[in-house]
Amino acid sequence: MSTKIEPLNDDNYQSKSEQKREIQEITKIGERLLQIPIETLKQYPLSETSLKAILEGKKITSAIGRNRQIKYIGKLLRKEDIDAINSKLQVLDHEKLLANKQFHLLEQWRDDLIAIGDSALSKLMLEAKHLDRQHLRQLIRNAQNEIKRNKPPKSKRLIFQYLKEHLIE
């Protein structure tokens, strides 16, 4: 009686720990999908069952029920094209990153305009000739006066809104 031991096929072998890590990653993706607005979510390559489970998960407020639903979504996502979903999530992350950079740039311009004044305004006008210099000067003066008098920063907000409307496409 001879027993022949089959060699392990290294290409398909996945340890139990690796399987668990993969399942956890997929579950995290499912958790992220719960945070995405419904209209955006409909653009993702999801089956009807997975989409329905995610929409149901958005309605659940109980922590225990939500965790159970997240695990269920993770189970459903194992049958989905995770690479396509992941690439969509990366695009979304990139868009958020760009929006944050633009937001911080606008904040920086606003703060420079108030702190430095005319020289910062001249630099800004070189970059964006379509802005109304006179209107911005008035807002800057008002913001500086509000700071001196410890008033609420109404003009500071108005400067930010003006820059946001005219500098972001």
Image (cartoon, rainbow, N blue to C red):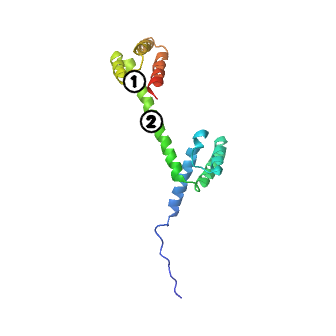
Q: Position of residue 42 (x, y in %)?
A: 60, 43
Q: Residue at x 45, y 33 (%)?
A: 100
Asked if residue 11 lies left or right of residue 54, the reply is left
Q: Nearer the viewer, residue 160 or 66?
A: 160
Q: Secondary structure at mark 1?
A: helix
- Residue type beneath disc 1: Trp
Q: Nearer the viewer, residue 126 or 162?
A: 126
The answer to whether any part of residue 61 appears in the image is no
Q: Position of residue 15 (x, y in %)?
A: 50, 64
**Marks 1 & 2, CB-CB < 8 Å contact:** no
| Label 2 sits on residue | 98
Q: Residue at x 51, y 45 (%)?
A: 89
Classify mark 2: residues with Cα within 10 Å, few (<14), some (14-19) or many (20+): few
* Up/down of 61 relative to 8, above or below: above
The residues bearing labels 1 and 2 have C-alpha atoms spaced at a distance of 17 Å
The residue most toward the bottom is: 1
Q: Nearer the viewer, residue 129 or 97?
A: 129
- Residue type beneath disc 2: Leu
Q: Nearer the viewer, residue 81 or 149?
A: 81
* Up/down of 111 relative to 81, above or below: above
Q: Secondary structure at mark 2?
A: helix
| Label 1 sits on residue | 109
Q: Position of residue 153 (x, y in %)?
A: 48, 17
Q: Position of residue 79 (x, y in %)?
A: 59, 56
Classify mark 1: residues with Cα within 10 Å, few (<14), some (14-19) or many (20+): some
Q: Which mark is residue 9?
A: none
